[in-house]
Amino acid sequence: MKEWLRQIPPVHEIQRHPQILNVEEELGVSREKVTSWIKETLDQIRADLLRNQLTIDRATDFMDYVVQRVYEKSQDWKQYSLTEVINATGTILHTNLGRARLSDEAIQHVVEVAQNYSNLEYKILEGKRGSRHNIVEELIKEVTGAEAALVVNNNASAVYLTLRGLAKGKEVIVSRGELVEIGGSFRVSSIMEESDATLVEVGTTNKTHDYDYKSAINEDTAMIMKVHTSNFKVVGFTESVDKDILVPLANKHNITYYEDLGSGALIDYGESGIGDEPVVKEVLDKGAHLVSFSGDKLLGGPQAGIIAGKKHLIDHLKKHQLARVLRVDKMTLAALESTLKAYAKGTKSALHSIPTTRDIVKNVSEIKAQIMSFLERAEGLSLFSFQVQSSFSTIGGGTMPNEQLETYGVTVNCYKMTPSQLERQLRKLSTPVIGRFLNDQVFFDFRTLTPRDIDCLYNQLLELNQKLEVM
Ligand SMILES: *Cc1c(COP(=O)(O)O)cnc(C)c1O
């Protein structure tokens, strides 16, 4: 094959090829960009030829071959690296797949604010400089009953700011049963160390008593912190101390009682028979001085960390330099405002319009109906067979780990490949489809699929079916 080396066309000839000229126009890229793709491609071809790793059919026109490779390179470049996927895993808050999906209203609000100037830090009525802190604070107060609130980049930042702002150089008491690592490598002990607060561990992994807390309090104590053990549960011989005891204890010693709630439910999922996730408002009603939670877990909004509670503490945190470092941008605030508004309208509105809450309470008959209409269309997919199966979905995002939501889906078989080959092919589609395995077969859980997703899923399978039919 090495004789091909002498036949490699010069760059300027490739540049003039109609298909290459077209790339410039199609992608709206500069001639320099296309030239760099040509040069990279030629380098690769040269290297492949030298290593004898290139096999080209003798009948192929070499110029056509090179042009095709340059064209493929341009098409690869065109793809975004952050891309839509179809989540057929049934895990609603999949941290690897972007956690919460935003509601239609939230997306619209983001677009309006991103496309235009806004009053992000401007008081329209007074014509004066304002603060971005005010944009969603009233709504957070409304839905949580807090005196004040602050939004930062994510809940890990919220924990960090709270500890650094209120307990730097002081002691923070945490039960050993709550020193957890949470999805995405969040460790309370590490954040504590970074914040320069001293962690005082009390109790044991399975049991912590009120006297453990009492005897740990001294003049250096700034805070009692409770961490919601979102992603694991100690079962059996356990005991933890409730805020009914810890809040009065903190009050008596004039220290802060803070709960890192993690997922932060604004509605009581227990009423729908799902889990026992503490509701933010109830925790604050019981006297917690501060709580923090994520915006993109159970809340179903954008990535954000919300700190809510006593006004004097929030005011102190707002003034901290770190609040500026960890501030959120206007798109986050827009999405959060719309999401919180859905809660402020009432539980029914939240359950209806926020994708996360909607998927959590989605009932089995709706899931089954979606499957039936999918199967009707899927009959035309000659190389696939589907079988309806019941299973369980999880909420994910480290939220309510023990909660198994009854669900339905389909196991998928392809006559031309094994389940693991199929799973790989599905990930390579133009819109990747991420399913899971059930009894060693590829399974699509319909809980996390919207009608639009199902449309897209069908089209992707059709594409694959056509590709396989001619192979
Ligand atoms: C998820 C979680 C965090 C981290 O929140 P992010 O929004 O992902 O930064 C912190 N604490 C608890 C208890 C959590 O569940």
Image: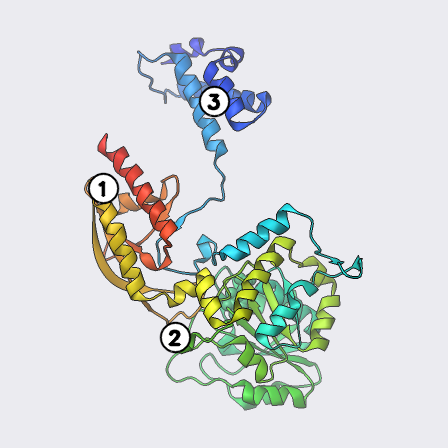
Quick one: SS at disc 2? helix
Quick one: SS at disc 3? helix
Quick one: SS at disc 1? loop
Q: Which residue is mark 2?
A: 272
Q: Which residue is mark 1?
A: 381
353 on left or right of 461: right
- Packing grade of label 3 (10 A; few <14, some 14-19, many >=20) is some
Evaluate if marks 3 and 2 touch, with contact meaning CB atoms under 8 Å apart: no
Closest to the camera, between mark 1 and mark 3, is 1
Q: Is mark 1 within 8 Å of ligand 1?
A: no
Residue 403 seen in render: yes
- Packing grade of label 1 (10 A; few <14, some 14-19, many >=20) is some
Mark closer to the chain start, 1 or 3: 3
Q: Which residue is mark 3?
A: 41
Q: Quick check: 179 above or below 152?
A: below
Mark closer to the chain start, 3 or 2: 3
Is 182 or 451 nearer to us in this picture? Answer: 451
Q: How far apart, in angstroms, are the residues tagged by discs 1 and 3?
A: 38 Å
| Residue at x 68% of width, y 74% of height | 167
Closest to the camera, between mark 3 and mark 2, is 2
**Quarter of the image holding residue 335?**
bottom right
What is the x, y in percent for residue 229?
Answer: 48, 73
The three-letter code of the residue at mark 1 reads Leu
